Amino acid sequence: MIKIVPSGDSIIIINNLNNLKTSTLTDYLEKLELNEIEDIISLKSSVGILFNPHKISSSDFIKKTKNLLSNKNFTNNNKIKTWEIPICYDKDFAIDLYEISTKCKIDVDQVIKKHNNKTYEVDIVGFLPGFLYLGKLDDSLHIPRKNNPRTHIPEGSIGIAGNQTGIYNIESPGGWNIIGRTPLRLFDKLKNPPIKIKQGDKIIFKEITKEEFYNY
Amino acid sequence: MNNTIEILRAGIYSSIQDLRRVGFKKYGIPKSGPMDEYSHILTNWLLNKDIYSETIEITHYGPKIRINFKGNIAIFGSNCDAQLNNKKIKIGVSIKVKNGDILDIKKCIDGNRAYLGFSGEMKLKKVFKSLSTYEKIRIGGISGTKLNKNDTIYFQNIKNPKIKNIPSSFIKRYDQNNIIRIIKGMHFNKVDNKKKLLNNDFNISPNSDRMGLRLTNNSIKLNCNDEIESTVVTKGTIQIPRDGNPIILMSDSQSTGGYPIIGNICKTDISKISQIKPNKRIRFKIVSLSESNRVLQYERKKFESKLGIDLSA
């Protein structure tokens, strides 16, 4: 049974989706183009709606959303794309590669192989502009975030933390363990939408050399 | 140059902001916009402009500007020491200006920020529907940054509306009442000592910015430090990071957060907390969601009946 709860006076959160994918629900809600909605944030197991409380009170908005979702038969969306993203694991870019290898107690070659040899799913887009959270990382590579986040991580850096790998599509501070870098610019602030990759899409990493990186 | 303003001194942190960047958080791009939306909206009202229009947000110490047009300007928000051609001017009232006038806005007195508006539209390129400056990815403003010395801003559709005053019932003092109303958050029950949270004061840290206000001097212990799943956050969300010093997310904040959320500031009180000076004290008061909605409704009716402003527009 879908559950809808308020978070403050300007957010409602939809939980308990069972087999319904958050991306399907988000797609449906976006197409309704409801005037009171400011933004819909699609997370791994919940969907958050930011709305304008001057247009509707949260209790009325919860009722309205419940009505919109009751007895609705959703078919999970099938427009999933697969993206091939080049990644260079050279130590110039993979600044934490040796540390990852030590912490996970496996050889550097194996770290690369285990990271590369997998199809990931985009769990969440956002947090930072264009940041991509990808799951699920191989069990042997699960390590926590760094205790002291770096103040500066270059654009395109690819990190690991917990059971996810993630792509920093803008330069920013961050605490993920950096395992490689892509020469692709996936976030373009001059375009709308600024990023084409969507939640639920598949990602395959293709290993490239440093020469290929610079000639990309 | 006609129909422009020239920045002779930028001030500590002056940036162009509006309320138009709605709908891009799903890509991780914040709404940005004025920290104090209340004062921004009233500044626009003084100039007959809609609530979404752009103003210059002035922080602590303002800019010195040469005005090269005939029209109106207005300042509202924190009381501040402002002069036009070396003569003191008031805030909360629109003022006629002419070619060559020099506007000098110095110190913010009782609050942190004042909003400066003009009776014309800034001729700048909108990025993600908005002129709001967001420096992290260099969008909005003139070239994605706060105002700098020697910047020139071009205007179009400059009007000469009637002089207006902000009615006294809309004027706030930011150095007196320090009670901030909050609604319990989804992790409120994790708070170890709820009395300490509500009966003790917090200090606003000088280490606060447009992303978030940091509170110190009343660290909050949680009874359970399990990792929580990231959830949606917005302006006014109160997070407790590991060190226990709350962070209140503000205009440039991220869209999701993984720290426990003990509360959310009522929308009507977010503007107020943005004006409370560093090192000053605040105290939280819990209200129900329906109480917060009543306050919002009251404010909406007041804006509508006294000023003809539709906050739900």
Image (tube, coloured by chain):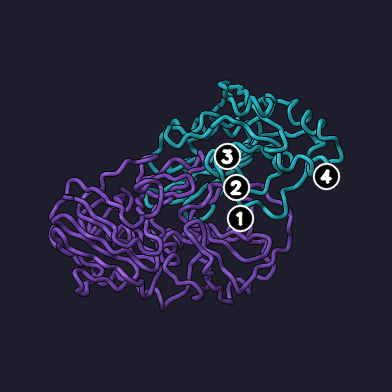
Chain colours: A cyan, B purple
User: For the residues tagged 1 and 4, is the chain the same?
Assistant: no
Marks 3 and 4: which is nearer the front? 3
Image quarter hosting the N terminus of chain A: top right
- Three-letter residue code for mark 1: Met
**Would residue A43 be seen by someone viewing this image from the given angle?**
yes
Q: Secondary structure at mark 1?
A: loop
- Residue at the image position 29 percent from the left and 58 percent from the top: B7
Mark 4, residue position = A103
Disc 4: which chain?
Answer: A
The reply to whether discs 3 and 4 touch (Cβ–Cβ < 8 Å) is: no
x%, y% of residue A174? 63, 48
What numbered label is drawn on residue A204? none
Mark 1, residue position = B186
Mark 3, residue position = A155
Q: State how far apart marks 2 and 1 are (Cα).
A: 10 Å
The reply to whether discs 3 and 2 touch (Cβ–Cβ < 8 Å) is: no
Disc 1: which chain?
Answer: B
Q: Is residue A113 left or right of residue B57?
A: right
Mark 2, residue position = B231
- Three-letter residue code for mark 3: Glu
User: Foreground: B225 or A5?
Assistant: B225
